[in-house]
Each structure stands twice: as C-alpha cells, then as structure tokens.
C-alpha cells in the first residue's frame, strides 16, 4: 500500500466533504448522529450512532471506515441506513487522527498485529448492541475499502448475520478468527481496481470455500477503486474513479441483503 500513494493524493482522497457524498446516501432531514466514546485496552475511541426516528427496536449495522478513518462519507452512509430502517454505528479503528503520510503504516499496523482489527471492531459492535433501540439478535456490518476488511472480520468471528464490503480489501489480517462462517457475505469490487489483484480474488474465494461460507463476490466491469466516493476523481489516478452506476447498484444490493438477513 505504501507505494501506491504520495502525500498529495492521500490528502485529496480522504479529505471528504459533505458535498462529495452521493445524494442517495444523504439523509434529507432525518435522524442526527450522536457521538459515543468507548474504550478498548484503556484507549478511547469515538463512534457515531444514529437510529430511525420511530420508537421501536431496530436491527443494527456497524459501518466501518476507509483507511484514513472516520469522515463525512461514512457518517452520511450511517444516516442513510437509519433512513432505511436500521440503527447504525460508525466505528473508530484508530482512536486518534494522524497526518496523511502515516496512512500506510497505520493501515499495516492494524493488519499486522494479531487480532487487533477484530478486537476493536467487536468492541464497537458491542456498543451498538447495547443501545436501547437496537435488537442485539439482528446485527450486520458494512464497510468501505479497509472497512470491508473490518466487516469481514466480524463475520469471521461469528458476530454478525451478514457482512458487506464496498471496494474492500480481500486479504485477511493477522490473527483472523478461524472456523466456519455462518454470516452471509457480499463483497462488491470493480474489475479495474488496482488494489484488488486477481490473486487476491482467488485467495478470497478459496478462503470462503474452506470456511463453508455463503458468499458472493460481485465484480463491476470497467469500475475502479473507491467507486462510492465522488471525491476520488480529484486525484486523477488510473484505476481510481467514482462510478454513479456502481455506487447506486451496490447500495441497492447491500440493502437487499440487509433486509433479507436482518428484517425477515
């Protein structure tokens, strides 16, 4: 990952503004986000919780951020999930902000320390499950880029009914939970994504077969990395581009799976 970016491209890609968020992922005048602090191994993390306005118990969905951390993109996606009838919690994998040049090292730190992503994601899921409006028996996870890895970790650990990844990494972090996966898996990638080479796809498919998982790997032809984020077009890098079609189609596919697994 370290040889893929320089400081300027990182700043452009991850400085997401609300104006960059696609219209279908913006809540018009709906539920507001509430910040929630929680602790893992004595370190403080800050997530963002939102639920539908009605008084009821709702299925819960953890929303996992890209490699640079929590931004307006994932917050808006959480609000859109609330509009669709889900309580959502944007997790925090870092517990702090950091300068762009550290991104590769921060990401690799999460990937290389055994069980770290799973431990931090599990803590966030427990925060979500403890909310008054959440039915803890109906939980799912979705994530973007690095967040797709995070969603998969929760599925590998048997903690969610389903996991969805948008332009996700398909490699497993060190210390991933082993064993059969009972969650439904949906990974949504672009065929022109330089961050997901063919061997990663083959290795992922082999892992899913080994774990006897119910899984789907959907490939959008002619689509690159970060296709859900209009802000990516500003970097002008081959293989990185927003796709309105893939964005809307993948969001619909996610909602279909969530509805099937968490609302049925």
Image: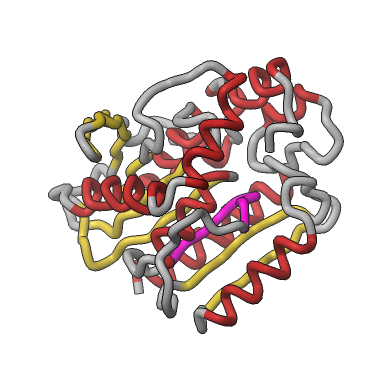
Task: Inspect this view and state whether residue 86 appears.
Answer: no
Range shown magenta: 162-170
Please indicate whether residue 204 sits to the left or right of residue 195 in the image. left
Task: Inspect this view and state whether residue 64 appears.
Answer: yes
Q: Residue at x 60, y 35 (%)?
A: 22
Q: Quadrant of the C terminus?
A: bottom left
- Residue nearer the viewer, 155 or 18: 155
Q: Quadrant of the N terminus?
A: top right
Q: Residue at x 78, y 55 (%)?
A: 197
Work out whether 12 lies above or below 250.
above
- Residue 195, percent from left and from top: 73, 46
Please indicate whether residue 140 sits to the left or right of residue 225 in the image. left
Q: Quadrant of residue 233?
A: top right
Q: Quadrant of residue 219?
A: bottom right
Report the label total: 0
- Residue 88, percent from left and from top: 34, 46
Render colour scheme: secondary structure
Work out whether 13 lies above or below 164.
above
- Residue nearer the viewer, 229 or 143: 143
Work out whether 70 lies above or below 205.
above
Q: Is residue 60 magenta?
A: no
Q: Residue at x 41, y 77 (%)?
A: 182
Work out whether 22 lies above or below 201.
above
- Residue 180, percent from left and from top: 43, 79
Identity of the residue furthest to the left in this view: 132
Q: Residue at x 35, y 69 (%)?
A: 158
């Amino acid at each position: 990952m370290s040889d893929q970016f320089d400081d300027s491209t990182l700043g452009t890609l991850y400085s997401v503004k609300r104006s960059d968020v696609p219209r279908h992922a913006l809540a018009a005048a709906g539920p507001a986000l509430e910040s929630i602090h929680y602790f893992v191994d004595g370190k403080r993390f800050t997530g963002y919780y939102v639920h539908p306005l009605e008084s009821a118990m709702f299925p819960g969905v953890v929303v996992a951020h890209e490699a640079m951390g929590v931004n307006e993109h994932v917050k808006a996606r959480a609000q859109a999930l609330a509009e669709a009838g889900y309580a959502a919690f944007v997790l925090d994998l870092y517990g702090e902000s950091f300068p762009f040049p550290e991104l590769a090292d921060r990401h690799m730190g999460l990937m290389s320390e055994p069980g770290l992503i799973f431990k931090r994601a599990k803590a966030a899921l427990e925060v979500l499950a403890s909310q008054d409006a959440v039915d803890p028996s109906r939980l799912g996870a979705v994530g973007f880029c690095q967040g797709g890895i995070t969603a998969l970790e929760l599925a590998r650990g048997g903690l969610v009914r389903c996991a969805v990844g948008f332009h996700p990494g398909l490699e497993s972090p060190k210390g991933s939970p082993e064993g059969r996966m009972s969650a439904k898996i949906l990974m949504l990638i672009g065929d022109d994504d330089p961050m997901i080479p063919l061997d990663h796809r083959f290795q992922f498919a082999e892992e899913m077969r080994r774990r006897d998982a119910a899984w789907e790997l959907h490939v959008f032809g002619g689509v690159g990395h970060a296709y859900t984020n209009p802000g990516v077009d500003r970097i002008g890098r081959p293989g990185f581009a927003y796709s309105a079609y893939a964005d809307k189609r993948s969001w619909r596919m996610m909602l279909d799976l969530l509805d099937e697994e968490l609302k049925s």
